[in-house]
Image (spheres, helix red, strand yellow):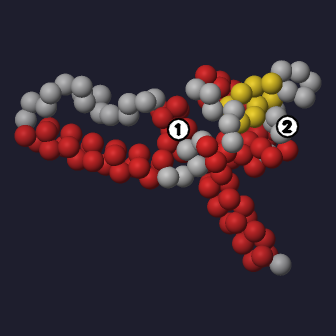
Amino acid sequence: MALLELAAHYSNGEPLQIRQIAAEQNIPDRYLEQLLATLRRAGIVRSQRGAKGGYILAKEPWKITIFDVVKCIEGGDSQPHDAHQEPKSVDGTVLREVWQEAKQASDAILKNYTLQDIAEKRESRQRLDIMYYI
């Protein structure tokens, strides 16, 4: 959600402060600080110091995939805790194969969407909601 805020404000080139993002998305400040620090270390956002400082996307929103974000936040290898051990049974082998197939499918979907895509979907949905209230 924080990245959607940054994507929505990307074109004006001005960074957003944590308190702005937190207020807009109802995210606790401390939690948001930790998330943004993780995203900064991964090169997804960058921070700017000073009175007009804050956070901004490190690259264009159409170049950041949702896969990049999930990989950064959840870690590069989201497999079951015993995935690095050889399965001890046929059941374990079959479950591992299904898990790998599911992971490949979800990764493929997440790689097809960028922050720009999600921001545009959000904007479109918001316009529809406004039209219903008129």
Q: Is residue 68 left or right of residue 118?
A: left
* Residue highlighted by disc 1: 68
- 49 or 131, nearer to the observer: 49
What residue is rendered at 72% in x and 46% in y? Answer: 7
Residue 44 sits above or below residue 118 on the image: above
What residue is rendered at 30% in x and 33% in y? Answer: 80
Give how far across and how far down residue 125 sits, in percent: 68, 66
Report which quarter residue 117 is drawn in.
bottom right
Residue type for callout 1: Asp
Secondary structure under tag 2 reads loop
* Residue highlighted by disc 2: 14
What residue is rendered at 69% in x and 42% in y? Answer: 60
Residue 101 sits above or below residue 19 on the image: below
Q: Is residue 46 visible?
A: yes
Give how far across and how far down residue 101 sits, in percent: 27, 47
Give how far across and how far down residue 40 sits, in percent: 65, 26
